[in-house]
Amino acid sequence: MDASTKSGKRSTHQWNAHEDGILIQCCLDLKDKGGWNGGNGTFRPGYLVHLEKAMAEKIPNYQIMGTPHIQSRLKTLKSQYREISEILGNAASRFGWDNMNKCVTCDIEIWNGWVKSHPGAAGLRNKPFPYLDQLGRLFGKDRATGAAAEGPAEAIENMQAEEATTSYAEFNGLDFVSSKNPIFENKF
């Protein structure tokens, strides 16, 4: 797993899911050690050297550098995490989360409309994103939150619970917004 040189300029590295998992775990370990968390989903200066060493310990003969490889990958993962969080947060009713494949799902028309106003989301539909929860631990606090804010995992659980309630109501012939609902029978 060597870094390759592109046109004699900067070296590049093609990341795979296994390497992403190790990088994310190394970041979480560094965050949990204390003293390295800079707040707002960032690390204190010097963190790249520690991540580079930690990854080299976990993957022998690994020739990846903190700058530009790790720094660039973390920037990409953070951007993707933000996009998916926004999709599953504000627009959750139009999108789904495939928990088995760990990816955002929706109709292509809905996706194309979303990407027009959110170009950073291009390419994320049906793309496996297995480390969503772990990235939430790393980057989740860099976004403004309110009292009713929920993380991606809670958003998915709430969507599934809402779908189950709606399915139950439809199956039993209940109509929650009209006088056909037995709860409101005597009030209309």
Image (cartoon, rainbow, N blue to C red):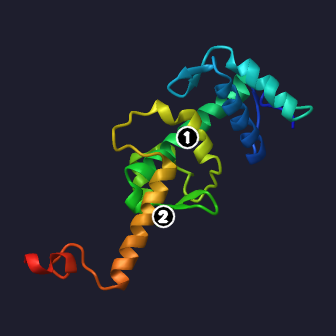
Three-letter code, disc 1: Gly
Question: Circle 1 sits in a helix, a strand or a loop, which is it?
Answer: helix
Pick the front one: 159 or 124: 159
Q: Residue at x 40, y 61 (%)?
A: 94
Residue 162 position by quadrant: bottom left
**Quick check: marks 1 and 2 in contact, CB under 8 Å?**
no
Three-letter code, disc 2: Cys
Q: Nearer the viewer, mark 1 or mark 2?
A: 1
Disc 2 target residue: 106
The label number, if any, that marks residue 63 in the structure image: none
Q: Residue 181, how many percent across, how many down?
A: 21, 79
Q: Residue 142, how many percent across, how many down?
A: 47, 30
Query: Cα distance, mark 1 to mark 2?
Result: 22 Å
Q: Residues within 10 Å of mark 2 (few under 14, many from 20)?
A: some
Residue 56 position by quadrant: top right
Q: Residue 3, how many percent across, how many down?
A: 82, 32
Q: Quadrant of the N terminus?
A: top right
The label number, if any, that marks residue 136 in the structure image: 1
Q: Earlier in the sequence, mark 1 or mark 2?
A: 2
Q: Is residue 139 visible?
A: yes
